[in-house]
């Protein structure tokens, strides 16, 4: 793997109807892809995660939040149904759907997680790390996280 990519300034995105806007600051210009079965059910394929050092959200009255597990919640626009973010409750960290941000259209894939759960019609090409679910959980546990 090469050198880490430089963070970019700020990028702005929005849901399908435009009622929810998100601006990410200090963006890591690469996408992490989650192939777990829960993300596939949530979004219809995989979850393409984009994160930054901070963010601003507008149109909060149009957002609904769903607690999808003991350790996570997911948000979507109540008006158009666009998925917006995943939040890991243990840390409060959020990642946002890369597809909300036009500027992210050409960002490379950083890595795939839960790659062993990918649907056969959802396999990604490219030379990037692919971690199994067991590897992801072991990595998280080694960092002190507990999934109950």
Image (cartoon, rainbow, N blue to C red):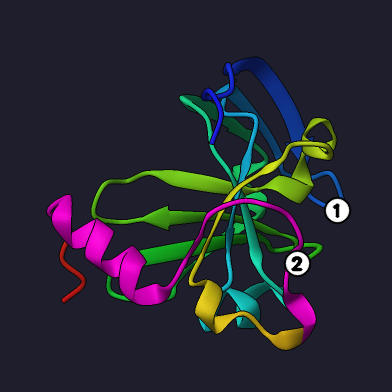
Residue 77, horizontal then vertical, whole percent: 69, 58
Residue furthest top in the image: 9
Disc 2 and disc 1 in contact, CB within 8 angstroms: yes
The one nearer the camera, 61 or 91, is 91
Quarter of the image where the N terminus is located: top right
Which quarter of the figure has residue 117?
bottom right
Residue 128 disc label: none
Which quarter of the figure has residue 27?
top right
Quarter of the image where the C terminus is located: bottom left
Residue 16 disc label: 1
Residue 57, horizontal then vertical, whole percent: 60, 34
The residue carrying mark 2 is: 81
- On the picture, is 44 further left or further right than 36? right
Q: Which residues make up the magenta segment?
A: 121-144
Res 36 seen here: no
**Neighbour tally class for label 2: few under 14, some 14-19, many 20 plus, Cα within 10 Å:** some
Residue ID at (63%, 78%): 40
């Amino acid at each position: 793997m090469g050198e880490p990519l430089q963070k970019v300034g700020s990028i702005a995105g929005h849901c399908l109807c435009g009622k929810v806007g998100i601006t990410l600051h200090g963006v890591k210009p690469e996408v992490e892809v989650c192939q777990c079965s829960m993300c596939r059910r949530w979004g219809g394929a995989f979850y393409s995660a984009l994160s930054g050092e901070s963010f601003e959200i507008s149109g909060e009255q149009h957002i609904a939040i769903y607690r999808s597990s003991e350790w996570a919640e997911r948000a979507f626009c109540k008006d158009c149904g666009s998925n917006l973010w995943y939040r890991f409750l243990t840390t409060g960290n959020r990642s946002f759907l890369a597809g909300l941000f036009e500027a992210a259209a050409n960002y490379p894939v950083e890595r795939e997680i839960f790659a062993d759960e990918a649907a056969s019609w959802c396999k990604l090409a490219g030379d990037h790390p692919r971690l199994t679910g067991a590897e992801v959980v072991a990595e998280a546990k080694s960092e002190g996280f507990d999934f109950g």
